[in-house]
């Protein structure tokens, strides 16, 4: 008889590109999301929670011409017993679901519709350092308004949000551009459509990586990249490439000068001039509200979503320096971006519906605060009531109930109580501020021992024996004073 092959044990690892989040991580994220939501709510935006799964048809932009439409998303075909079931996918952002929701419920929703949404999104992309396939986004959008006041408001709200979560003025800049200005430049060049236009757009998209000189080379004959490989250029002459370079380098010392440079770059292009006028309106509205160029500035080098955005675009960049994995100084970079996308709802309704919005990368923003030493302070764990006599579990549960009713986080040790040292090790791992001890003698005498674990740890780490004696970290108090003494110790450490 053939020997039955043993089934191998599964590896205790998450899939590549995914990670687990433990208590402190979850608490820090929730704290940030609550702070962001408070700002969005103050601006009049309402919460929306849509499904994590959409039809691939509704998501739209990831539909490739292949049998399995899963490029960029996690997709599967629904097995409903019929041939050709719907393709479903995890959402890759929070904007595509918004377009579907608005199109579906537009007769019942107020217009303009102002909504914010928070939650995880999933992208079927190659993971890398700090790049995960599941991450949190926090969006705010206005659907149904073509007014530049909506775009200015998004920028103002983004500035307020960054300062609220702990990024002070001077450590961030929100940069604003307009896709219409770029379209005007291309119109001046005679590149309204075709392969040459697409090639120029792809080159412009590399400006933040290769700079002015690199774009000039790529618009011309080509250039050697960092790996030594030669990248063919678009093949434009120097004169042909000049309008693009003029556009990308239009930023001047002040808003007025930048806008003047942009007007020169777009020439007589109607769409280009419309874009410059829209930027002027946004700048004026922000200035009237007191937002200065140290917070929000017009910057033509911002190029986002070339096939997606239809008007103003904006990007929030953190300007402080951090050290990378090799100890080199670098700026942290972008943590949020967005813009106007007037064509997205049209896919469902056939009618153009103006919309604008922003998306904050919550995980990147948390990482930025951590890198700057501004992350959320670690929270204390629960008070641990130790078990000295397993037959008196009811007494220990009563203590915990009293502490909880007083608003104090608390738990009874539920492991094997035989080794008391293990109970204190458990309390240390839980970052507990206090351990409560009541053995048989304490119970008979109507007292409890309250051990200040935070002070005890500090003394054990730094103090001499004499200081240990002068700073007691364990107190014997009447049983009736359990709650008041625990509260006193916790308050002392919270204050200090």
Image (cartoon, grey):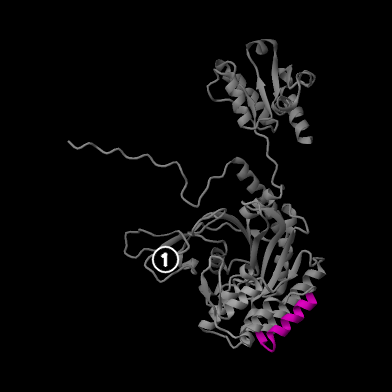
Picture layout, residue 111 above or below residue 416? below
Classify residue 246 as left or right of residue 206: right
**Which of the 4 quarters of the picture holds residue 424?**
top right
Is residue 265 located in the magenta-colored stretch of the structure? yes
Is residue 244 located in the magenta-colored stretch of the structure? no
Q: Main secondary structure of the magenta part?
A: helix
Picture layout, residue 370 above or below residue 220? above
Give the residues drawn in magenta, as a range.
Answer: 255-271
**Which of the 4 quarters of the picture holds residue 442?**
top right
Please identify the quadrant where the N terminus is shown: top left
Classify residue 82 as left or right of residue 163: left
Q: Is residue 162 visible?
A: yes
Tell me residue 283's x, y (percent).
Answer: 77, 73
Q: Is residue 143 visible?
A: no
Picture layout, residue 142 above or below residue 416? below
Assign a secondary structure to mark 1. loop
Tell me residue 334's x, y (percent).
Answer: 65, 61
Classify residue 12 as left or right of residue 45: left
Tell me residue 55's x, y (percent).
Answer: 45, 63
Picture layout, residue 144 above or below residue 323? below
Q: Residue at x 65, y 51 (%)?
A: 327
């Amino acid at each position: 008889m053939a020997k039955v092959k043993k089934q191998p044990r599964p590896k205790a690892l998450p899939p590549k590109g995914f990670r687990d989040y433990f208590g402190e991580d979850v608490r820090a994220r929730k704290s940030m999301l609550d702070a962001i939501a408070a700002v969005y709510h103050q601006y009049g935006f309402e919460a929306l929670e849509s499904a994590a799964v959409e039809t691939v048809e509704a998501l739209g932009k990831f539909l490739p011409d292949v049998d399995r439409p899963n490029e960029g998303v996690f997709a599967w075909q629904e097995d409903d017993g019929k041939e050709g079931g719907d393709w479903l996918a995890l959402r890759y952002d929070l904007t595509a679901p918004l377009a579907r929701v608005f199109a579906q419920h537009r007769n019942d929703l107020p217009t303009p519709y102002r909504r914010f949404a928070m939650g995880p999104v999933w992208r079927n992309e190659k993971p890398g350092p700090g790049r995960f396939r599941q991450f949190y986004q926090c969006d705010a959008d206005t659907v149904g308004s073509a007014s530049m006041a909506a775009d200015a408001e998004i920028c103002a709200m983004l500035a307020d949000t960054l300062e609220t979560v702990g990024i002070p003025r001077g450590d961030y800049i929100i940069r604003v551009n307009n896709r219409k200005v770029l379209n005007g430049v291309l119109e001046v060049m005679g590149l309204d459509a075709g392969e040459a236009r697409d090639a120029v757009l792809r080159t412009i998209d590399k400006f933040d990586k290769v700079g002015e000189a690199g774009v000039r080379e790529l618009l011309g004959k080509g250039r050697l990249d960092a790996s030594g490989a030669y990248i063919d250029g678009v093949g434009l002459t120097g004169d042909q490439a000049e309008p693009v370079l003029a556009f990308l380098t239009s930023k001047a010392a002040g808003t007025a000068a930048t806008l003047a440079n942009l007007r020169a770059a777009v020439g007589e292009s109607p769409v280009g001039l419309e874009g410059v006028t829209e930027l002027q309106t946004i700048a004026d509205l922000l200035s009237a509200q007191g937002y200065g160029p140290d917070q929000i500035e017009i910057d033509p080098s911002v190029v986002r979503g070339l096939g997606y955005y239809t008007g103003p675009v904006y990007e929030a960049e953190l300007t402080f320096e951090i050290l990378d994995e090799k100890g080199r100084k670098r700026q942290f970079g972008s943590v949020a971006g967005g813009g106007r996308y007037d064509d997205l709802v049209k896919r469902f309704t056939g009618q153009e519906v103006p919309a604008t919005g922003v998306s904050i990368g919550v995980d990147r923003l948390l990482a930025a605060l951590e890198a700057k030493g501004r992350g959320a302070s670690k929270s204390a764990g629960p008070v641990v009531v130790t078990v000295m006599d397993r037959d008196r579990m009811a007494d220990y549960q009563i203590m915990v109930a009293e502490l909880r009713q007083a608003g104090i986080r608390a738990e009874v040790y539920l492991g094997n109580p035989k080794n008391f040292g293990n109970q204190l090790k458990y309390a240390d791992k839980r970052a507990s501020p206090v351990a409560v001890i009541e053995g048989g003698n304490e119970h008979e005498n109507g007292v409890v021992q309250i051990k200040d674990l935070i002070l005890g740890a500090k003394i054990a780490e730094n103090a001499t024996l004499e200081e240990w004696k002068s700073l007691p970290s364990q107190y014997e108090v009447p049983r009736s004073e359990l709650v008041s003494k625990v509260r006193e110790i916790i308050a002392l450490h919270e204050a200090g």
